[in-house]
Amino acid sequence: MVKFIKAGKVVVILQGRYAGKKAVVVRNHDEGTKERGYGFAVVAGVERSPLKVTRNMGKKKVAKRSRVKPFIKVVNYNHMMPTRYALDLEQIKGTISADTFKEPTQRDEAKKVIKKLFQERYQTGKNKWFFNKLRF
């Protein structure tokens, strides 16, 4: 079987709390591990996308409305749908490791780093489509 879910691939989460949300694959484990006997991927995605901003809004309101709320999660391959799109994620790869999910404090720190990276990417205008809400 061809391995097409690779790091950087944008996926849509199908099951659970983040169903219908876009995410990007950070690490993929096709064969699984001892704890997880199935193929899975570590993903980082957008839980809450930024809101619409108009010209006559103040700086404070614009800053508040252009926030991105991220999530990180280990997802079974059966619970995600790959898209044809990909993101370059050189910075994200270093922040999430296998140890990140063992302790809640490490998870929170990783989430903060990803939030900063996503926010920066949104404000520069790179990959605008990734931060739009999925309409279906």
Image: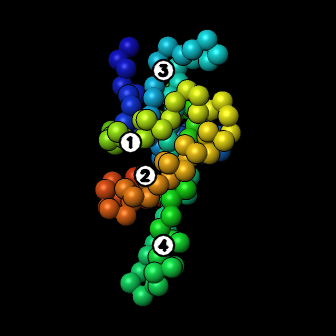
Residue annotated with mark 2: 117
Residue 1 in the image: x percent, y percent?
38, 14
Q: Mark 3 to mark 2: distance in Å?
A: 24 Å
Instruction: Check whether the beta carbons of the residues at disc 2 and disc 1 lie within 8 A of each other.
Output: yes
Residue annotated with mark 4: 63
Residue at 38% from the left image edge and 28% from the top image edge: 6
Could you say which quadrant of the image residue 88 lies in? top left
Residue annotated with mark 3: 29
Q: Earlier in the sequence, mark 3 or mark 4?
A: 3
Could you say which quadrant of the image residue 108 lies in? top right
Residue 91 - label: 1
Instruction: Check whether the beta carbons of the residues at disc 4 and disc 2 lie within 8 A of each other.
Output: no
Q: Earlier in the sequence, mark 3 or mark 1?
A: 3
Query: Alpha-carbon neighbours of circle 1 within 10 Å: few (<14), some, or many (≥20)?
Result: few
Residue 62 in the image: x percent, y percent?
47, 76
The answer, for residue 46, to whether it is visible in the render is no
Residue at 66% from the left image edge and 41% from the top image edge: 105
Instruction: Check whether the beta carbons of the residues at disc 3 and disc 1 lie within 8 A of each other.
Output: no
Q: Mark 4 to mark 2: distance in Å?
A: 15 Å
Identify which amino acid the numbered label 2 is placed on. Leu
- Nearer the observer: mark 3 or 4; the answer is 4
Residue at 50% from the left image edge and 48% from the top image edge: 113
Identify which amino acid the numbered label 3 is placed on. His
